[in-house]
Amino acid sequence: MKRSLSLLIPVFFFGCVLSQKSLTETEKDRAVRIGDAAVMKLMRELKTNLGMALKEGGFPKAIDFCADKAQKLTQKVNRELVVVKVKRVSDRYRNPTDKPDTLDLKVINYFKEKLREGKLPPYYIVESEKNGERVVIYYKPIRVAPFCLNCHGDPARMNPEVLRVLKERYPNDKALGYRPGDLRGVFKVVIPEKELKEG
Ligand code: HEC
């Protein structure tokens, strides 16, 4: 019994959940191109606005900015992208909107395992279904840089004003205590499969 179970789990994991079998190489290439473009667009939007808020009032001000604007900017980018959807997801989310679903969590755990082995891939593609439609999901890992620790680091070393604002805005914050290099989460880009077909 034990033996057959341990055989089943990997098959389920790779054969079913993280399936990308039916995609041709061209379709995979397209998914990567579309995924990267969406990630860049969201990243640029968030970075530019965070930079402006930091200049204006340092980290406490920038947190107010993130809390007010991160989701709105994400929605704006998605309106511009029209059919493709992009968002950030984390297993240790600060904003509950960024909570992962079962598939997200499997991919995050896969990235974490690869990171531990020193073999973190630049992205991962999975086929799935959303509202009855075939989709391809492009995931890109997000890692912690030293700069991020100002708002995601060890609370004992963080600015008390920053911590105060965070506590007020996010009473159930899970996104503290990171170290540089950690996996902070993923960009998730959902692409309708028909966007990848020829012609
Ligand atoms: C000025 C403070 C600040 C800095 C600096 C900062 N973050 Fe955040 N981060 C936040 C806030 C606030 C949120 C929640 C935004 C929201 O409500 O959508 C957040 C959310 C996120 C999320 C979305 C998942 C979640 O937990 O909701 C990711 C991923 C993330 N940050 C990664 C980073 C990375 C990587 C860096 C460094 C490059 C960074 N952050 C730097 C304040 C910051």
Image (spheres, helix red, strand yellow):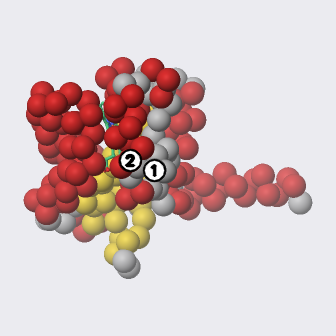
**Residue 148 appears in the rendering:** yes
* In-front residue for pair 70/33: 70
* In-front residue for pair 157/88: 157
Amino acid type of the residue that numbered disc 2 sits on in the rendered structure: Glu
Identified at 47% across, 35% down, the residue is: 176
Identified at 42% across, 44% down, the residue is: 167
The furthest residue to the bottom:
132
Q: Is mark 1 within 8 Å of ligand 1?
A: no
Residue 34, position as x, y percentages in the image: 21, 50
> Does residue 116 appear to the left or right of 132 in the view shown?
right
Residue 129, position as x, y percentages in the image: 41, 70
Identified at 57% across, 58% down, the residue is: 15
Name the quadrant of the N terminus. bottom right
* In-front residue for pair 82/174: 174
Location of ligand 1 given as a quarter of the image: top left
For mark 1, give the secondary structure.
Answer: loop
Identified at 46% across, 46% down, the residue is: 173
Q: Is mark 2 within 8 Å of ligand 1?
A: no
Q: Which residue, given by chain and number where applicable, does mark 2 sit on?
A: 168
Q: Is residue 96 above or below residue 132?
A: above
Amino acid type of the residue that numbered disc 1 sits on in the rendered structure: Pro
> Does residue 186 appear to the left or right of 69 in the view shown?
right
For mark 2, give the secondary structure.
Answer: helix
Circles 2 and 1: CB distance less than 8 Å? yes
Which quadrant holds residue 83? bottom left
Distance (Cα) linking label 2 and label 1 = 6 Å
Residue count near mark 2 (Cα–Cα under 10 Å), binned few <14, some 14–19, many ≥20: few
> Does residue 15 appear to the left or right of 55 in the view shown?
right
Residue 171 numbered tag: 1
Name the quadrant of the C terminus. bottom left
Residue count near mark 1 (Cα–Cα under 10 Å), binned few <14, some 14–19, many ≥20: few
**Residue 121 appears in the rendering:** no
